[in-house]
Amino acid sequence: MNTIYLILGGNLGDRKTNIDKALRLIEVSLGHLLKVSKYYQTAAWGNTQQPDFLNLACVVATDKNVEECLKIILAIEQQLGRVRLEKWGARLIDIDILYFNNDIIATENLTVPHPEIANRKFVLVPLCDIAPEFVHPQLQLANRQLLDGLKDSLEVLEYMMRRD
C-alpha cells in the first residue's frame, strides 16, 4: 500500500463543491482518504489578478503506483471541467501530488516531492493539519518546520462556510 499526499484547490465556480466532488472521485478511483485538512482561502499565488482560491490537503492510501495516480488525478481534473490555458491561471479544480511515500521522483511529467512545497504557505498550512511531522525526503525537515521557517507572507485563512 502506498501513501500519497495531495493538495486540492480552485478559484472558479462553486469552489467548495468542486473540491468536495474531487474528494469523492479520489475516494472512488484512487484510494481510501485517511485524513483531510480544513478548507483554507487564500489570494491567488503567481498570477494575482484572479479570484481567491479555496484549498485543502488530504492523504490517501492507494494500491496504485505514482504514474497510475497521476493519470487518475488528471482524469478527475478533466472530468470536473479543468481546462489548462495558462500557468497559474484561474481554474475550477487543481490537484497536485505533494508526496508519494518517501519517494523522490523526477520524470518528464512529474516531480515528487512537489518542488514548491517549502515555498508556499497555502500548501503548508493545510498540509500541517494532516501531517505536521511528516519529513520532506529531500530537505529532511518536517512540514511544521518548513512552515515555521517560511518567508511567504500570503494570508491563509480558515474558510468558514456560511449558514444561510
Image (tube, helix red, strand yellow):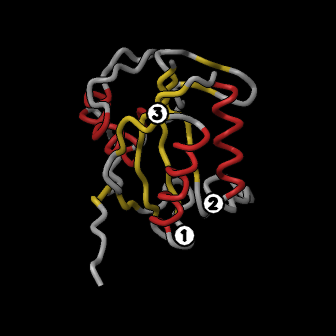
| Residue 132 drawn at (x, y percent) | 27, 30
Nearest the camera: 36 or 153? Answer: 36
- Of all residues, the one furthest to the front in this rendering is 28
Q: Which residue appears at 48% of the width and 60% of the height?
A: 44
Q: Compared with residue 148, is residue 17 higher up or lower down, i.e. above or below?
A: below
Q: Amino acid at mark 3?
A: Val
| Residue 79 drawn at (x, y percent) | 70, 56
Q: Which residue position holds label 1?
A: 50
Q: Which residue position holds label 3?
A: 60
Kindly indicate whether the residue at mark 2 contacts the one at mark 1 (C-beta within 8 angstroms): yes
Q: Which residue position holds label 2?
A: 89
As helix, strand or loop, the secondary structure at mark 1 comes to loop
Mark 3: give few (<14), some (14-19) or many (20+) Cα within 10 Å.
many
Mark 2: give few (<14), some (14-19) or many (20+) Cα within 10 Å.
some
Q: Quadrant of residue 89?
A: bottom right
Q: Which residue appears at 53% of the width and 63% of the height?
A: 18
Q: CA distance from mark 1 to mark 3?
A: 30 Å
Nearest the camera: 63 or 136? Answer: 63
Nearest to the eye among marks 3 and 2: give it: 3
Q: CA distance from mark 3 to mark 2?
A: 27 Å
Q: Amino acid at mark 2?
A: Gly
Sequence order check, earlier mark of 3 and 2: 3
Sequence order check, earlier mark of 1 and 2: 1
Sequence order check, earlier mark of 1 and 3: 1
| Residue 59 drawn at (x, y percent) | 42, 34
